[in-house]
Amino acid sequence: MQITQFCSEETHYRGYQNRQNRLCEDRSAWEVMNNLSDFEIRIIQEAGAKESTKEQIIPNNSTENSTELTTTQRMETTTEVKTTTVCPQDISCMALDVSGSMTRNDRVTKMSDAMKIYIQDYLRKEAAVGIVTFNRSAHILANMVVVSDNDVREVLSSVLPHTASGGTSISSGLRTCIAVANKNVNMPSTESSIKGTVSLDSTIGYNTTLRFAYSGTSDIDVNVTSAKGNNITAIKDIDAQVSGDEITYKITKKDANDVNVVVSVTAKPVPNSQPIEINTRVDSYDINFKPNSTLTIYTNIFQGLTPVTNLTVHCLIKTSTGLEVKMKSVDDGTGLDSTPNDGVYTASMASHKFEGSGYYSIQVEVDGEGIVPGSSTNRVKRCTDCSVSSLGTIQRTISGGVISVQNHVPVPDTTPPERIKDLSVDSGSERNSSTIFTLSWTAPGNDLNVGRASNYAFYVSNDSSTSNLQVLPNNHKSILTDVSSLLVDAGTNLELEIDFESLKGNTTQDTFYIRMTAEDDKGNVGDYSNLASLTIADPQSLFQFMQLVLGLSIGLGLFGVIVLAVVIIIVLKRKRYIKKYHANKA
């Protein structure tokens, strides 16, 4: 099949209830593409000789002709899958070279300036960091400290070196840095033990290693148990095959002294098993802030080409100023997530949620029992009756990178609830001599699909366009459901009953088109929903139609009888003729 053209504003049928109209607000393909900022019209233009052509790209919003030859390149990247479960706290120890070679070209000052930017803008809140310098020997400038506020950042910045001299011993710097970094987890003397749990899904767990590095005057006992009963030897370094299992460890001090413990877990993919790949991307890493700026985060979770669903995914956004925003990523087709259960989990931060210019770091946390469709196809929506298989509990924490926000100014909340895209209506049922229709939809949020809406508005029309919509008040007698009871959290399935006879009133109309909008607590109103139609046959029209059908049936029946009689007569006459012919011949 070859696509030769797209529907335009003139040829697109807006009233048809299909996926295009539902997701694209009844707009044609050309209307959607023309509104995209990155959409370009390609023009092939002859230049001189007929056999020589140039391809120039003219942006859709350009008013000038371009004669510049544009070359398009495709980059292909290969991703190496590394599956590792790490200690949840960010740990950084800086080993800074202050040997004599750093005096040339003012290298030591440039290094300190770069480290100051890293400390002030890139280090996440609650990260643990230490600073070590080395020349012929190593020196600790700052032991491991938790970055709890800006005062800690200032203290760390103030100890950065500005002079350099002496020889170079990189190994002493690295050894000291490792020793400092191992002091990040502190077990207070008032507590004798701590517990932790690590879940490994069915695709990892081969050559799993748990390491317990500790320092201090107290020794520790380590007890490790497996939910599946796998044999795990409790030593300081533990190796086991624990695919699809849950490991619980308990660390106990042997005396009352403090001890610092670092727990790390490393697991390799199971042989002959496709690992679960998790990749995160954002719509822009450099945001020149505007009142309508948003940040959309996409997390792709696949096993090969098969999407992994049923997971809980959160995006944690942190800034150097202390802002922390935790958002839930969804794969249910709501908000900016266009297709449910396709393995792409989506989260979005509205413009009024930003706090200042600077760098925003993104961390993605994945948890839950992942499932994949039983079919090998990655088109889940076509697999309606196929079985599913469980991958076990999946736990991952990955970095989503760092974005830069410039020219930020505080803006009010102008983000409306999301557009309702799944409004539907049943075929109706009889109740007390009236036809009751049930509208169904998924609840939007306060900001797109986050929170809860504050109000709903319903509109009726006698055609499928939006130009003749009339408001149907929430207290109208045709609305049988208390609308205030429908103001619930986003993602909830909702139903509302409408009495068609009360809606119809004194009119003779037998079809109504319904749309709706959602409003938030700031008065921001979302776009019109997709179209739903309520249709009931008028009794008089139905009676006339039945009379017509009956008349046609009788007429066709009589016609059939006449035709059959004629055929029988012709056959009988033909038989008589043949019989008479043979008799005369004899």
Image: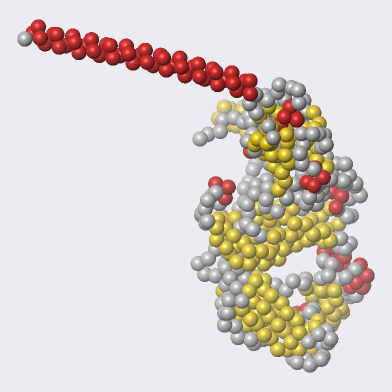
Q: How is the image coloured?
A: secondary structure
Could you tell me which residue is drawn at 11 percent across and 11 percent down? 582
The quadrant the C terminus occupies is top left
Say which of 260 and 456 sits in front.
456
Say which of 420 and 68 sits in front.
420
Say which of 536 and 260 sits in front.
536
Indicate the quadrant where residue 148 lies. bottom right
Indicate the quadrant where residue 454 lies. top right
118 w.r.t. 496: above or below: below
- All told, the count of numbered labels is 0
- Residue 496 visible somewhere in the drawing: yes
Indicate the quadrant where residue 564 lies. top left
Q: Is 522 on the left-hand or right-hand side of 441?
A: right
- Residue 423 visible somewhere in the drawing: no
Q: Position of residue 413 (x, y in %)?
A: 88, 46
Q: Is 445 on the left-hand or right-hand side of 202?
A: right
3 w.r.t. 100: above or below: above
Q: Position of residue 455 (x, y in %)?
A: 83, 42
**Furthest residue in direction left, as rendered:** 586
482 w.r.t. 50: above or below: below
Q: Position of residue 211 (x, y in %)?
A: 67, 81
Could you tell me which residue is drawn at 81 percent across and 81 percent down? 186
Could you tell me which residue is drawn at 73 percent across and 27 percent down? 504
**Furthest residue in direction top, as rendered:** 584
Say which of 223 and 481 sits in front.
481
Q: Position of residue 313 (x, y in %)?
A: 71, 59
Could you tell me which residue is drawn at 72 percent across and 25 percent down? 462
Q: Is 572 on the left-hand or right-hand side of 368?
A: left
